[in-house]
């Protein structure tokens, strides 16, 4: 890690605090920005939408994916958004959503905080014009993960929306050290594939167990530009990746649906692979091995999606409370434990139906034996990664 | 159809024309908004990216999906964008991407045209504050489909991004009459599913053959609001649907990858079903039956994705041009016609690989016998639709 030549802008950062509302209203009128979100409760999708105001999310990288993710979370009324980026807005960024030409030259974090505060003053914005891979800025980043939450404690999630290996490794290291849940995202250099991945230290694959499948190389945009070439990018693929990411954030924080451990997107064929990636017991990151030991008895469904078991239990209860049984017919108790049914149902409100559901053969639970274990073929990738640290 | 009380704003519409560039540059510098798009050529994804400047797309409905679709197409540098919407911006729309609070009270079309012209002055914007379902405004809409193109001819695509049956039926009727390719999109009222669908009159299912799977009822937002309730919506699901839609538009217009005939999105399980929907030979729309007769010998791959056959032929040619054959060994000619291989390969540039591809079992060609034919269960839906006309 290099030491930075200039001080981090986080020291004199703006803490943009808007006029906070007292409560989110579900009243339907033209002036209420939350009516369509609070309707998620009436529809039976989310139990307590307003919980979102208690959550803090850090977004590292406010580019093609990160800026759109930040806008989505802001419009959803997230409690607090902490943003990191060391770059400035350029006209060359205009092929992606969010930034506008009049912002060229501004730091991405200041430009984003300004726009987002205009969109929703209820969200606390904390922009940091910083490079978290520089040693003196990394410690401040660690501190914000630990103490940036609404209650002064740890934040709820860190989102990696960066375009290079170095920043991903720094986020991975910090989150392993702090046992901080995070989500990784990436878009390929040819602009036609992307992915998101939930990272739980010791429980799922870390970035050093194996790098994500789609990140094509270790070269960031600035390096490419010096060489007179650039990666391709499309607002569609970047927007889709941001949508996949923030949808997973909403499901994870607001406790509904099935949180994806890994979701890929191949735009050429409209193909969206999902998979569960377990940690490697030969991971070069010592902290990852320690976390694996700590979480060796971990169970995915009850840890990540406890509402699945609750929903299954509620569904089982409905079955038991049947109509009056005049004939005294008895039946055997359902001997399938609630946990086993957990992944089979997606409970939504009465009178509402989902147009189609993933078939149950495809929708597997995360069992130890199903976890993809990285194998020996990754050795040279690891060596490459180690050389970059 | 009702007659409108007031004249359509299209009569006094603004034709916002920006400073047009001469050519899209692929030069990598901070000031070039097209470098990342032109890089798609260097990466081998698109043959002639600049073709996009010749295309005109109509977007009907500039709400949660339509506004984001318009922004994506604008940033991609589409030639001309014609937008229709009869609504104004409200603070209650702020839970979706694109519009900002300062635009409240403006017509959605004017607000969008203003923002989009600032983002990319190279795109010709034609906003119409109109309700295309009203009889006197429908004719003007038909005229713009027929003559709105860059060359004064028909536009290249119509995108339906509306929230009600009436507008979908009007678009369907106009496109059937004019033999105009269009794409339908929709998001469910519970905010957790969406879909897009390519509509080719006589070749694929029309909106009267069977309404799309996800549109839950015939009630639009204004009606719901009068009753003190509203549909739920999320910026994530709307952004994903816009991304799926515009990605399909780019593939269709710029001739790459596999164009999806139907792509669904279930956010609860991150499930993305694809299918091919053929027209019904008992469709109540007479014009649909006529177009079916006109296109009875139609072939999907050669009509919608001619580049697939070209790519397969090019790949076959590469196989034939093998190294010098000193031993005079001969082999049988490959007897698989290029067309049969068409769907099997996705050709991309040298040195570039896609992280994952849809397995070939899933990636079926559109064969007559595979087409889903709507059956008798749809009779009451049709009666319901007919009653609304």
Image: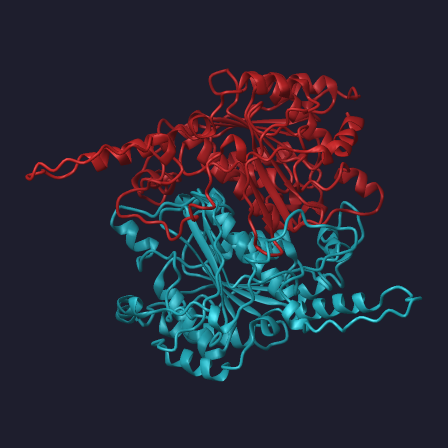
Chain colours: A cyan, B red
Q: Is residue A159 above or below residue B364?
A: below
Q: Is residue A358 above or below residue A138?
A: above
Residue extending farthest to the left is: B326
Q: How many marks?
A: 0
Percent position of residue B107, x then y: 68, 33
Percent position of residue A192, x then y: 41, 46
Q: Quadrant of residue B89?
A: top right
Position of the N terminus of chain B, as image quadrant, is top right
Q: Is residue A22 left or right of residue A236?
A: right
| Residue in the image at 50% along x and 57% along y | A110
Q: In the depicted view, which residue is nearer to us: B259 or A223?
A: B259
| Residue in the image at 32% along x and 44% along y | B29
- Residue B131 in view of the camera: yes
Q: Is residue B141 above or below residue A282?
A: above
Position of the C terminus of chain B, as image quadrant, is top right
Q: Is residue B154 left or right of residue B186?
A: left
Q: Is residue A344 left or right of residue B244?
A: right
Q: In the depicted view, which residue is nearer to us: A41 or A136?
A: A41
Percent position of residue A178, x then y: 48, 78
Q: In the depicted view, which residue is nearer to us: A336 or A300?
A: A336
Q: Quadrant of residue A300?
A: bottom right
Q: Is residue B5 above or below residue B168?
A: above
Q: Is residue A123 left or right of residue A47?
A: left
- Residue A113 in view of the camera: no
| Residue in the image at 35% along x and 29% along y | B23
Percent position of residue A254, x then y: 66, 64
């Amino acid at each position: 890690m290099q030491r930075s030549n200039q001080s981090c802008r986080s020291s004199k950062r703006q803490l943009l605090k808007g006029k906070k509302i007292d409560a989110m209203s579900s009243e339907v009128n033209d002036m209420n920005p939350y009516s369509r979100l609070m309707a998620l409760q009436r529809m039976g999708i989310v139990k307590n939408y307003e919980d979102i105001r208690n959550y803090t999310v850090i977004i590292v990288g406010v580019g093609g994916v990160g800026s759109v993710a930040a806008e989505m979370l802001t419009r959803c009324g997230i409690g607090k958004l902490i943003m990191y980026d060391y770059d400035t807005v350029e006209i060359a960024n205009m092929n992606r959503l969010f930034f506008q030409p009049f912002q060229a030259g501004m730091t991405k974090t200041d430009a984003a905080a300004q726009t987002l505060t205009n969109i929703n003053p209820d969200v606390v914005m904390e922009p940091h014009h910083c490079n978290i891979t520089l040693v003196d800025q990394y410690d401040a980043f660690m501190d914000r993960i630990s103490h940036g939450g609404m209650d002064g404690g740890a934040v709820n999630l860190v989102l990696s929306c960066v375009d290079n290996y170095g920043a991903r490794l720094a986020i991975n290291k910090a989150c392993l050290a702090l046992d901080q849940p995070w989500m990784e995202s990436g878009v390929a250099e040819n602009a036609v594939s992307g992915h998101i991945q939930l990272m739980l230290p010791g429980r799922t694959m870390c970035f050093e167990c194996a790098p994500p499948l789609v990140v094509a190389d270790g070269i960031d945009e600035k390096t490419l530009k010096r060489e007179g070439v650039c990666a391709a990018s499309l607002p569609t693929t970047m927007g889709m990746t941001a949508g996949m990411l923030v949808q997973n954030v909403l499901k994870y924080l607001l406790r509904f649906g099935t949180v994806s451990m890994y979701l890929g997107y191949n735009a050429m064929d409209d193909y969206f692979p999902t998979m569960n990636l377990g940690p490697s017991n030969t991971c070069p990151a010592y902290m990852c091995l320690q976390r694996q030991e700590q979480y060796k008895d971990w169970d995915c469904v009850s840890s990540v999606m406890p509402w699945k078991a609750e929903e299954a239990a509620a569904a089982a209860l409905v079955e038991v409370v049947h109509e009056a049984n005049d004939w005294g017919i008895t039946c055997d108790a359902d001997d399938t434990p609630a946990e086993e049914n957990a992944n089979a149902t997606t409970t939504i409100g009465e009178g509402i139906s989902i147009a189609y559901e993933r078939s149950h053969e495809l929708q597997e639970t995360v069992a130890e034996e199903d976890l993809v274990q990285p194998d020996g073929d990754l050795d040279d990738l690891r060596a490459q990664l180690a050389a970059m640290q």
